[in-house]
Image (cartoon, grey):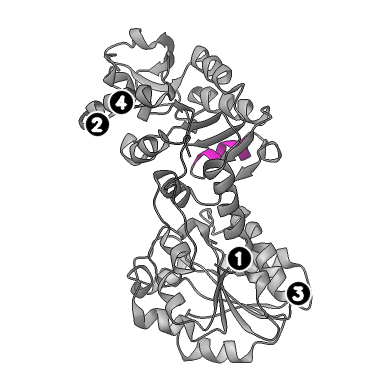
Amino acid sequence: MKFINEVDLRHKRVFIRVDFNVPLDADLNITDDNRIRAALPTINFALDEGAKVIVASHMGRPKGKVVDKLSMAPVARRLARLLRKEDHEVKLAPDCVGKAVTKMVKALRPGEVLVLENLRFHPGETLNDEAFSKELAGLCDIYVNDAFAVAHRENASVVGIVQHAPLSVAGFTMKKELDYFRRALLDPARPLAAVVGGAKAMTKLPALENLLDHADKIIIGGAMANTFLMSVGYDVGKSLYEEELVPVANVLLRNAKRHGVKVFIPVDCVVAERMDPKAETKLVTVQDVPKDWMIMDIGPATSLLYREALRDCKTIIWNGPMGAFEMDAFSRGTYNMVSTLAQSYALTIIGGGDTDVAIHNAGETDNISYISTGGGAFLALLTGETLPAVEALGGITGLEGHTRQG
């Protein structure tokens, strides 16, 4: 797999697939532009090398139809502001393919940027349609994939286009993501701990099963921990849990013991009568969860246990909050974990999702080694899957052959 700094970009039409799927408020103002900022090194490098830059991304899920509120217009304006160079004009195309777009691309001069309209306004994007892929590839001399966040999806702009573009390479964001993945899981400093939280055990169990061959410690939090508590005989009251996965969780705990992996589950929790920030709350041990109450967060004893478990770790990966942290009453467990990682001397990697929101809210971004731009893609790597977009570029991902034993 080649990277953008290994090819000649001068006067070339360079199509950069980025992930600018940023959050917008009701007035269509961008509320967090970190994904745009993450792509700036790749875009600036292409501009500095004298390329004619075409930027492409999706926004939301328009399901193959034009949805005005999901236009790339706010992104184009923010990108223009962030580039802050008078000689780098940023234009917005009316579409991502078609005669009008082709004409705008032909008119591009070195140092100019053209932002294509939302790729997902066309059904061919998510279907990885060959004709649509060919149209996109026809816009460029060089294709650059810098969208790690969608690397696990077989979309036209990340997989199909590679088959038709004259030359395809990876950008700096993609390189950084894969480099940190290798440092964290393929050749980590040990002990290696994986902190896994979030609501659904179903989405995380495959990753946990795969991590048994790689991690030294696994720490479980969030609503998915309820399934594990049920699997060892605790009653979780009215808490959310996945009944059909209780035996699967029990088997995973037994397998962890055989692998010599230490798994930590909550010992106390914050419970409430209902999922409401104004609801009455109690702090109880996991043995004493009231029948008609719900577990909403890990408790202080659990936070202390987890902090001690992570104290000697040299590499820590975290994906998923410890509780319903969007409500202040149930946020302490998640922010205690943020504090633990921020104060750690370990290599700390946040695997996207809601976890990065907690890091930003706590003001600890600068104290974390790396925050991934892709929750789903990072989770796919933890599961041991090969990323279609990386494979298309000639790269190899996955954890095969890389275990604690060798």
The structure residue drawn at horizontal position 39% and vertical position 51%, both measured from the top left corner, is 385
- Residue 48: give its label: 3
* Element carrying mark 1: loop
The Cα–Cα distance between marks 1 and 3, rounded to whole angstroms, is 14 Å
The answer for how far apart the CA atoms under marks 4 and 1 are is 40 Å
> From the viewer's perspective, is residue 347 above or below residue 334?
below
Camera-side residue of 148 and 107? 148
Q: Which residues are magenta?
A: 354-361
Identify the main secondary structure in magenta: helix
Amino acid found under the numbered disc labelled 2: Leu
Residue 356 within the magenta-colored segment of the rendering: yes
Which of 365/395 is in front? 395
Measuring 51% from the left and 12% from the top, which residue is drawn there?
301
Instruction: Name the residue beneath numbered marker 4.
Output: 227
Sequence-first disc among 4 and 1: 1
- Specify the amino acid type for callout 4: Thr
SS of the residue under disc 3: helix
Write the residue at 50% across / 89% down.
Answer: 100
Residue 245's label in the rendered image is: 2
**Residue highlighted by disc 1:** 171
Label 2 or label 1, whichever comes before in sequence order = 1
